[in-house]
Amino acid sequence: MLAAAGILGYWFVTLPDVAGLAESNPTTTALIEARRAAAVEKGLPLGVSWAWTPLARIAPNLQKAVLMSEDASFYQHQGFDWDGLKEAFSKNWETGKLQRGGSTITQQLAKNLYLSSDKTLLRKAHEVLLAWELERRLPKQRILELYLNVAEWGHGIFGVEAAARHHFGKSAAELTEDEAALLAAVLPAPRRYDPLQVTPYLARRQQHILYWMRRGNGRASALAQRPSGRDEVGWVGLYNAALVEWLENENRLNDLCLHTTAGTTEWHECRDDKMKPKQYVLPLRSAPNETATSEGALLIVAVPGQGLRSYYRSARAGTATEFVPDLFDADWGYGPYFHQTFLERRGTWFLLPAAPLPKPAWVDVREFAGDPQVRLLGIGEIISTPTGDVVVLGIERGILRVRPEQNADMWCEEGEPPPLQPSEEVRVPVDELYGPTRHLLVRVKYTRGC
């Protein structure tokens, strides 16, 4: 305890003058010097590409992509994501090693500027102290500007301006939404992944970032602007955010029933109330409009401790039939979310196939409380088909271009991935991806921990 107090006191006394960063830009960073030292030790050259650019000349797309990727609550916290830190420390305490970070952008900036990349609890504690000082001395916009200008984006590539010019041949001000999301996607492992060599992992991560960039940003109406989508292949989410949150009741009963005394009748009544099923009703129509004939409804039911369940109830029968959605897709947060094959898209309406429905029927995604989850097969996706696991190379009218999956496609280990081996491209008719009732036979493949 005394030793820890002594170390903490020493850190306070020797804190760098971060206030100077409000007006001047750093001429180097601890990370850059560490990379140079490692290159010298290996006898290898390291050319550093680094060009400073003010925040006003960094595309808003890139700023938002990085925030969504690395620290979505950046403007709400004071330098720390306490829930993330608590979870990270609880998982790492037993090993004595920092295997999981939970770092905010401010913490990452502190590490890049002043600290080593050692994964130790001691370094993490020093990082927290430096982040506190950065937040105390600098405005949020300046912290973000510093981070974007010192972050590593490849071997010898530092800062977003150098990254944009190296990877896309343009300035940071000119980055498109897709390019910004791709650059943000490589940040957790910038020397392992290359935005110009999109792996299935990068493509999937890019799509997650794009989704969160567009969510709540006036982009929901983009669904209504899409064409009919007869050639789209994918699933539409059958869930409601409020129901997903209701599932968490199982883990927070102590907080929800805090006003009661454990074991009493009042406590049991509170528990029963918070653990009871809740349902959301999605009306089905014979055509893509609200005045069309009712074809029944889908019921999405949240049962704490048991997850989400889906049922079909016809317009004529009072009983409901449970069914299993075509796809279970876990989001970054609490899941899983249900997805059902759709055959056609008309604005915000999606045509669902038969089974469990007696015939195809339309559902409006606006019934999902404004938060639809649409999952399309995309380039770089790894999917499991009846004939094996493949990587999607392209989608043309009625044709899916694929190749067999390889070990390098889902590389989650330290170090460089194994090289891709030459393989023959296969053209698969899209109709072969559907079963007799027009449900998709393919599944999106995930690797645990990746």
Image (cartoon, rainbow, N blue to C red):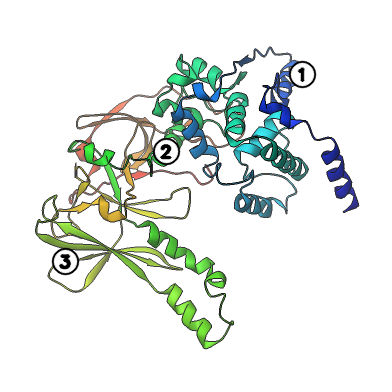
| Residue underneath mark 2 | 213
**3 horizontally vs 413: left or right:** right
Secondary-structure class at tag 3? loop
Q: Nearer the viewer, mark 2 or mark 1?
A: 2
Secondary-structure class at tag 2? helix
**31 horizontally vs 403: left or right:** right
| Residue underneath mark 3 | 314
- Considering only order in the chain, which callout, 2 or 3, is on the residue closer to the N terminus? 2
**146 horizontally vs 286: left or right:** right
Q: Up-down: is 399 above or below 172? A: below
Secondary-structure class at tag 1? helix
Q: State the separation of the CA atoms marked 2 and 1.
A: 41 Å
Q: Residues within 10 Å of mark 3 (few under 14, many from 20)?
A: some
Q: State the separation of the CA atoms marked 3 and 2.
A: 37 Å
Q: Quadrant of the N terminus?
A: bottom right
**237 horizontally vs 358: left or right:** right
